[in-house]
Image (tube, rainbow, N blue to C red):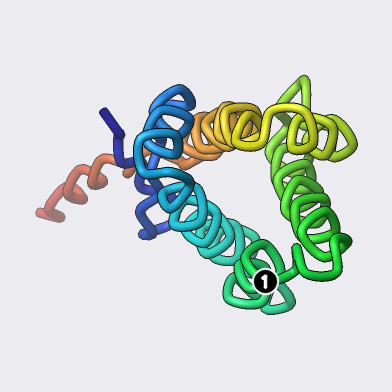
Amino acid sequence: MAEMVTIDGQQYMKRNPLGVLGLSLITLGVYFFVWYYKINVELKNIEKDETINPTRSLMAMIFGWLIIVPPFIAMYNTAKHVQTMETRLGVGQTVEPALAIVLMVLFAFGNGVYLQEHLNRGWDAAAAQVPAVPAPAPPAPALA
């Protein structure tokens, strides 16, 4: 079951990493592409980085297989964005983009488990950094 986390007024989804793998297998890979697009949108929003283009990344993953290289570049860049987010938020052990590529080659959808686990760590760290809403100040004493 996914849990919603609100950070700076935006909602982000903490997905179960094994759920990403299971749904990808059950839907014969369709969910993987839906997930991949959604995490790129979330990364674009949390990093406030207009250079992240979820549609371009998705198209590279879907159609890039015709010339072999684009899906690997797209996955590497996505993992790099996750790593940048984790570093900025102070997550101790960050994602390794090269490992994401190796998992992509060896286990097809296995890198989804790896990236989602690191995204969840990022959402937890970002949610922990959000300052609590301060209590209203007590009213000033009335002057006599």
Q: Looking at the image, which is closer to me, 104 or 125?
A: 104
Relative placement, left or right, of 20 versus 105 is left
Coordinates of residue 73 in the picture (x, y in percent): 85, 59
Q: Secondary structure at mark 1?
A: helix
Q: Quadrant of the N terminus?
A: top left
The answer to whether residue 41 is left or right of residue 104 is: left
Disc 1 crowd, CA 10 A, few/some/many (<14, 14-19, 20+): few
Task: Compare residues 94 and 141 and report the one nearer the observer.
Answer: 94
* Amino acid on which disc 1 is placed: Phe
Q: Residue at x 59, y 70 (%)?
A: 54
Quadrant where the C terminus is found in the figure: bottom left
In the image, residue 5 lies at what x, y percent? 36, 41
Q: Is residue 128 left or right of residue 59?
A: left
Residue most extreme to the front: 66
In the image, is 108 to the left or to the right of 98?
Answer: left
Residue topped by disc 1: 63
Which residue is located at x 43 percent, y 49 percent?
7
Residue 21's place in the image compared with 40, above or below, is above
Instruction: Residue at 45% x, 22% y: name it.
Output: 18
Q: Residue at x 75, y 68 (%)?
A: 64
